[in-house]
Image (cartoon, coloured by chain):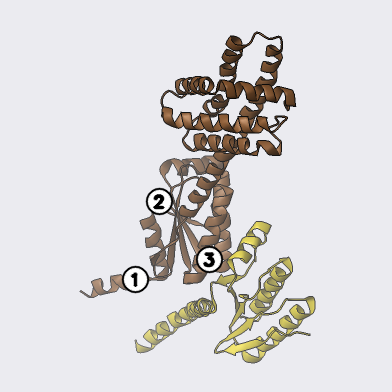
Chain colours: A yellow, B brown
Amino acid sequence: MERVPVLKIGDILLVSIQVDMSDQTAVQLQEDLAERIVATGCHGVIIDITALAIVDSFVGRMLSTIASISRVLDAETVVVGMRPAVAITLVELGLSLEGIRTALNVERGMELIAATRDDDHGYDDADEPGDQSTDTR
Amino acid sequence: MALSAEESSRLTGLLDEHAERITNRWVELLAASLRGRLSQAELRRQVQELHHAMIEAARSGGFDLESESAGELRAVLAELSRGRARQGFTATETATSVYALKDVMLEVLETDTTDARTLRDYVAFSSLVDQMGLFTFESFVRTRESLIADQAEQLLELSTPVVKIWEGVVAVPLVGTLDSARAQVVMERLLQTLVDTSSPYAIIDITGVPAVDTQVAQHILKTVVAARLMGADCIISGIRPQIAQTIVALGIEFGDIATKASLADALRHVLRLTGVEAARRQPRRES
């Protein structure tokens, strides 16, 4: 059975789907990804679908499921590299990828995840100087 | 509708015998109906070609426009109507070029023979001319259709530029009516450009769109949703006051898609989102 590799880059897990997804591959990927998120403590998941020429409701649901699992494990999911033809087909079919963030390419996806993490840290930082200022007083 | 061998031989005889008179009269009638938009010499050349082709077709036995022997006549007729269609003559004027022959033949038959067969000949001949006229008309329509198809294609080619107006921002100035085919082309070009330039923002400018109805709005919405699926955000700009009123009156919902009055506003909006303006303000504060 084909397996989709899950690569760790810094604080992000990169999943590049290069094969046609079957039920088994999808379930395996979900299991692998969940385990890796817990094991590495990563806060971002990038799913690269550049190689996918066809995205149907099955793949759409798989992406949604992965995003939901990741969210439960406190990781942000970004789907990147969707082809124009795929996007047009999805729109024509009336399918939408609910709850999934998208970016044009892996680079933009990493920026997006970094930006969201920054926002979160931003609130922490905002608290810390406040604490410091009370200390100095 | 074919003429019998006997009839066509008589026709050949007539056409041959009165060649000069027929062509002269024919040219005269055509010149009158076309009111000098084609030169006499040009008309004469066309008429002589037709006349010659008819004799050739009739000489080879039973005269039938569908038959192989009438191939040259068909070619001449097609050429004639193509020329007329391209020069912008009306269908009536084109068909009259052939139908004028009826009048000419009537005159010839009236003065020439008082035979009992004359009437029957004329009727048979007349139906043949009708057939030729219809053929001309069909060629005319075909030429016009191909002209229209060519123009539609040209329009499609020149209509949809996607321009990069800032780092990471592309704009599509839409001009003209958006039908399904054009909307499809626009959508594909825009999405492809987003991928090629890896721009996360696109501005769709509809200043040049004369009217926005539900269908056009639907096309624009689809494009925006597709761009979002790919990870890019779209801003719609160039909404004129009347268009805004129409949009509200039709109850079109743009949802959370940003709409701006002008392209400049849209660009400012995008730059603010990307934080470019913040970077420009800081030096001012320092100074």
Where residue B56 appears, x then y in whole percent? 63, 33
A17 or B239, which is in the foreground?
A17
B212 or B92, which is in the foreground?
B92
Q: Nearer the viewer, mark 1 or mark 3?
A: 3
Q: Earlier in the sequence, mark 2 or mark 1?
A: 2
Q: Residue at x 65, y 33 (%)?
A: B57
Q: Residues within 10 Å of mark 1 (few under 14, many from 20)?
A: few
Q: What's the CA distance linking mark 1 and mark 3? A: 30 Å
Where residue A70 appears, x then y in whole percent? 65, 79
Q: Is residue B282 visible?
A: yes
* Residue that numbered label 3 is attached to: B192
Q: Earlier in the sequence, mark 2 or mark 3?
A: 3
In the rendered image, which quarter is residue B165 located in? bottom left
Where residue B160 appears, x then y in whole percent? 47, 55
Q: Is residue B4 visible?
A: no
Q: Residues within 10 Å of mark 2 (few under 14, many from 20)?
A: some
Q: In the image, what residue type sits under mark 2?
A: Ala
* Residue that numbered label 2 is attached to: B261
Q: Quadrant of the C terminus of chain B?
A: bottom left
* Label annotation for residue B278: 1
Q: Earlier in the sequence, mark 1 or mark 3?
A: 3
Where residue A32 appears, x then y in whole percent? 71, 86
Where B181 sits versus A65, above or below? above
B127 or B120, which is in the foreground?
B120
Quick check: do tags 2 and 1 share a chain? yes
In the rendered image, which quarter is residue A28 located in? bottom right
Where B281 sits versus B57, above or below? below
